Structures are given as C-alpha cells and as structure tokens.
Image (cartoon, grey):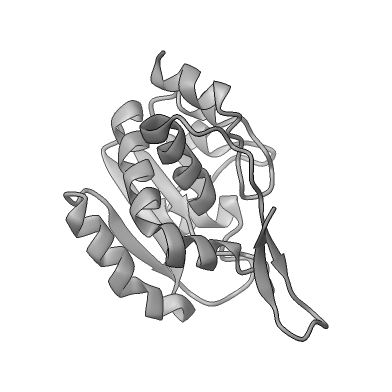
Amino acid sequence: MSFVETIRNAGIIGAGGAGFPTYVKMQSSPDTLICNAAECEPLLYTDYYVIQNHIEGVVRGILLAKAQLGAERAVFAIKEKRHELFPAIEKAIKEAGGGIEIFTLGDYYPAGDEQSLVHDVTGRIVPQNGIPIQVNVVVNNVLTFFQLWNAIENNVPVTERYVSVVGRVKHPYVAVV
C-alpha cells in the first residue's frame, strides 16, 4: 500500500481543528512543511501533552511527510513560553538525523492560526479564503504528525482523540478518548 493510501485508510485528518484530510495534503509538492505546535487557544494543552509523551513519533512523522512531499524545508513552530520542551524537541530531531528547524513564536493570540503561522515562518501571505498550499506550504498539527508516523510505521489507524479538560476543574488534564 502506498504512503497516501496508508494515511487515508488510517483516517488521518487535521488534528488542529479544521479536519482537512491529510492524504490530500500529502499529494502536493510544497517547498516548506510546518509542524504547528503553537497551541493557539490559551487553555488547550493537547499539543504540549503530545510533545511530552510522543516527541520521537512527531519528529519521525515530520521527516516522513517531508520526504513524501519533497519539501526543502521542515519547521517545528512552537511558542517561546514552551521553552521547557525545547531540549526534548532538539534531542529528538538530532536523534532522527536532523532536517527540521525550530521556529520560536511569540506568546500572543493568534500565533497558531494557520495564516498567521505561514506568514511568521515564511513571510508569505495566504490569500483570503485560501489555503497554505497556494503559497507552497503545507501545515499540520503536532498530533497529525504523530498519527501519520503511527500509521506508516506501525499500521495503526486513528482511534483516539486527545482532549484538554480545563477551566473550573480541580485537576486540569488531557484525556485520551
């Protein structure tokens, strides 16, 4: 089975919110691939959780996607306020052979918005009502890259969702449902 068929059959869609089918993105030819680890909404912690628990799979997923797309550049975009995660990210990138740069975003809303992210990382402007591939960029969320790696390397379909349980609760946490 091909790369694209595998991720399509695994049911991988954008985990960042829009739900765009990942297999469609994996059939394009961008020059830049961005891993969106910015966690735009202030109370969400799912990206943080995935990075803490699955960074090796995330990094390997980025590299698999970069190779599939033929992208010249792969970027791991994350907010400065998550600086405590940087050593683990850097270590995972180094152990996987490199090929991914870390781009530090400011701690402002909406730093993780796809259009803002593309502009921050590349200087390009996505057309109004457009998508990043129109400016030669593909963006996926941290969890999407982990799911992609898990599908390609382990033949595991998407059967779980990561949910932040926050607000007026005694102990905020991320649930895997």
Establish if 8 lies above or below 15.
above
In the depicted view, which residue is nearer to us: 116 or 143? 143
Image-quadrant location for residue 95: bottom left
Viewer-side residue, 50 vs 81: 50
Identified at 61% across, 46% down, the residue is 15
Single out the residue that lies furthest toward the bottom. 170
Which residue is pictured at 55% across the width and 23% down the height? 8
Residue 168, quarter of picture: bottom right
Q: In which quadrant of the rendered image does the N terminus lie?
A: top left
Q: Residue at x 42, y 48 (%)?
A: 34
Residue 17 vertical placement versus 90 (above, below): above
Numbered-mark total: 0
Q: Position of residue 48 (x, y in %)?
A: 52, 68
The answer to whether any part of residue 87 appears in the image is: yes
**Residue displayed at 50% across by 27% down:** 7
Could you say where residue 97 lies in the image, as x and y percent from the top left?
16, 49
| Whether residue 81 is situated above or below residue 161 in the rendered picture | below
The vertical placement of 7 against 76, above or below, is above
Query: Between 2 and 138, which is closer to the camera in this rendering?
Result: 2
Q: Residue furthest right?
A: 168
- Does any portion of residue 30 appear in the rendered image? no
Q: Position of residue 161 (x, y in %)?
A: 66, 49
